[in-house]
Amino acid sequence: MGNTLQKTDQNQEQELPDESEPFTCEICIEPMLLPNKKFNNQNRCVHPFCIDCIVKYISVKLEDNVGKIPCPSLSCDQFLDPISCRNLVGPQLFVKWSDVLCESSVLGVPQCYCPHRNCSALILDECGGNAKRSQCPNCKRSFCFKCKLPWHAGFQCEENRELRDTNDVVFGVLAELKKWKRCPLCRHFVELSEGCKIVKCRCGANFCYSCGRRVYRHWCTCDAASWFCIRAVQFFCILFVILAILFVWWNFQISKRSKN
């Protein structure tokens, strides 16, 4: 049974077929005598499909994670409306459809799911950069966006996977609270109560307590004071070399004149 489309006046409106007439589904090719079995895509298109075939079609598309579901007709460029299909597909399939649409709309944006139990909320990194410690907007608990695990205070992502003792977790929280630094060579925690920020670990490595980088001299370029000291030392070293060269050249000129 064909569809009749007629243009009226300047609005080019579509004349819809009589909904009370029987029809033949274009998917299962079965004649339908009950008009209420016909699917209506909010009058976006007028292709005859039975409701059972449309529900199965939507289910298959959602299994393939297709959220924007096109009309089954090959010659149609319209899409199925999730709101109008809500009562047809049921609450479980509709929720899945909504989730697929949500995930497809954020493709390309860094995302993860909350790792805490009874949550698993979808979280997006809308700020960009290298996100690490984050707070779930749903359960308000902290987690690591990088390794997708609950927050491992004081420990690296690869170390977090090896944690087995509860005391290690508590110690990591304490280290983060006290802002203890870790030696860049042996990875042991070091606490600086007072004194110079260039500290020496028990393994023999010197590192800066401010930025955590290993240093080989008694200064670091992480603050303005140290940067000024380094530049001042470099300036005086260059000045000393220039004066030494001038002194040698001056003595050479004097000795040359005395011989003449």
Image (tube, helix red, strand yellow):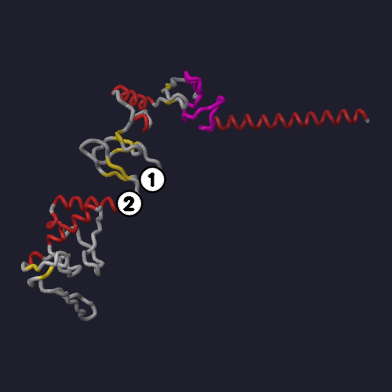
Whether residue 202 is in magenta: the answer is: yes
Q: Nearer the viewer, residue 188 or 234?
A: 188
Q: Amino acid at mark 2?
A: Leu
Residue in the picture at 22% in, 39% down: 119
Disc 2 target residue: 107
137 left or right of 175 in image:
left
Disc 1 target residue: 128
Residue 94 x/y as whole percent: 17, 53
Mark seen at residue 113: none
The answer to whether any part of residue 146 appears in the image is: yes
The local crowd at label 1, few if under 14, some if 14 to 19, many if 20 or more residues have their Cα within 10 Å, is few
Residue in the picture at 24% in, 55% down: 67
Residue in the picture at 27% in, 50% down: 103
Residue in the picture at 17% in, 77% down: 4
252 left or right of 7 in image:
right
Q: Is residue 254 above or below residue 83?
A: above
* Quarter that holds the C terminus: top right
Which residue range is magenta in the image?
A: 198-225
Whether residue 121 is in magenta: the answer is: no
